[in-house]
Image: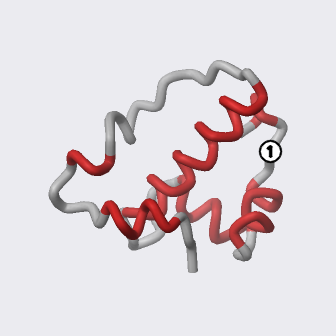
Amino acid sequence: MSRLGLTAERIGKDFGVSGSRVEQIITLKSGALEYPWIIRAYLLSKAAAQGVELTPLTALRGNPHDYWFLDGDFIDRGEID
């Protein structure tokens, strides 16, 4: 987030949630397995748009559609409650 100049509050505004909700999600305490993947996709998209190379993520790797326990359609919608 810092390499992109983003704060939890800024990300929260983009999703219509609070910064504290984003903090819960990025610390993997959201309760919904798909939410961190949504934030991941958001960050990767912002990085690509800004031409910023991010440090590889360690907890969320690969394509979420390859994991049977994730709802890929939910992730693709990109919505957070």
Judge left or right: residue 44 versus residue 47.
left
Q: Position of residue 71 (x, y in %)?
A: 29, 66
Q: Position of residue 18 (x, y in %)?
A: 74, 73
Location of the C terminus (image quadrant): bottom right
Q: Is residue 13 above or below residue 36?
A: below
Q: Which residue is pictured at 74% across the width and 58% down the height?
A: 11
Residue that protrudes farthest toward the bottom in the picture: 81
Q: How is the image coloured?
A: secondary structure
Judge left or right: residue 68 versus residue 9.
left
Q: Is residue 37 above or below residue 49?
A: below
Q: Which residue is pictured at 80% across the width and 45% down the height?
A: 6
Q: Residues within 10 Å of mark 1 (few under 14, many from 20)?
A: few
Question: Element under label 1?
Answer: loop
Camera-side residue: 71 or 59? 71
Amino acid tagged 1: Leu
Query: Residue 47 appears in which quarter of the rendering?
Result: top right
Q: Position of residue 54 (x, y in %)?
A: 61, 24
Camera-side residue: 49 or 36? 49
The residue at which mark 1 appears reads as 6
Q: Position of residue 66 (x, y in %)?
A: 21, 45
Camera-side residue: 45 or 80? 45
Judge left or right: residue 72 versus residue 53.
left
Query: Residue 1 appears in which quarter of the rendering?
Result: top right
